[in-house]
Every structure is written in C-alpha cells, then in structure tokens.
Image (cartoon, rainbow, N blue to C red):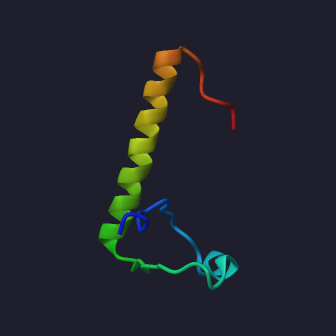
Amino acid sequence: MADDRIVALGLLTSTEVKLLGPQFKRLWPVDETPCFEGLLDAIDEADRQLQTSKLAETGSRPPER
C-alpha cells in the first residue's frame, strides 16, 4: 500500500500511548532486556556523534544546559 508508510517512530510510556487515544493503531511493546539497553546506548552515541560533527562544521559551541 502506497499510503501505508512509516511517518514516525518513538519510545512512549503507557501513559503517552493512552493520551494518543484510539486513533493510534500500531504499537510494538519492547521488553526490558539487556539487548534493548544496548540499542538505546547505540542511538544515544550516534546522536552525540552527529551533534559533535555539526558543531565542528559550524565552529560553534554546544548550548549550555
């Protein structure tokens, strides 16, 4: 189906899923297993590397937190 494509992906709490209501049609629960923790770590590391490369390209400093 041409109209049936992924438009978003997210990690949601059960409360957030309830807030989305009945129109939220697809949900794949993720078990809390050691391999899932590794996936989250890899995503975080990829994001850090992306931010670092963007800062290097622009010569700016990261925002203060």
Q: Residue at x 44, y 49 (%)?
A: 44
Residue 32 at x, y = what percent? 40, 77
Residue 62 at x, y = what percent? 60, 28
- Tally the marks: 0
Furthest residue in direction left, as rendered: 35
The foreground one among 8 and 11 is 8
User: The N terminus is located in which quarter?
Assistant: bottom left
Quarter of the rendering containing residue 28: bottom left
Name the side, left or right, on which 42 lies relative to 12.
left
Q: Residue at x 43, y 65 (%)?
A: 3
Quarter of the rendering containing residue 53: top left
- Residue 61 to residue 6: above or below: above
Q: Residue at x 59, y 81 (%)?
A: 14
- Residue 30 to residue 51: above or below: below
- Residue 1 to residue 21: above or below: above
Q: Residue at x 44, y 80 (%)?
A: 29
The foreground one among 7 and 64 is 7
User: The C terminus is located in which quarter?
Assistant: top right
Name the side, left or right, on which 7 lies relative to 17.
left
Residue 18 at x, y = what percent? 65, 83
Furthest residue in direction front, as rendered: 2
Residue 26 at x, y = what percent? 47, 79
Furthest residue in direction bottom, as rendered: 22
Quarter of the rendering containing residue 19: bottom right
The foreground one among 62 and 17 is 17
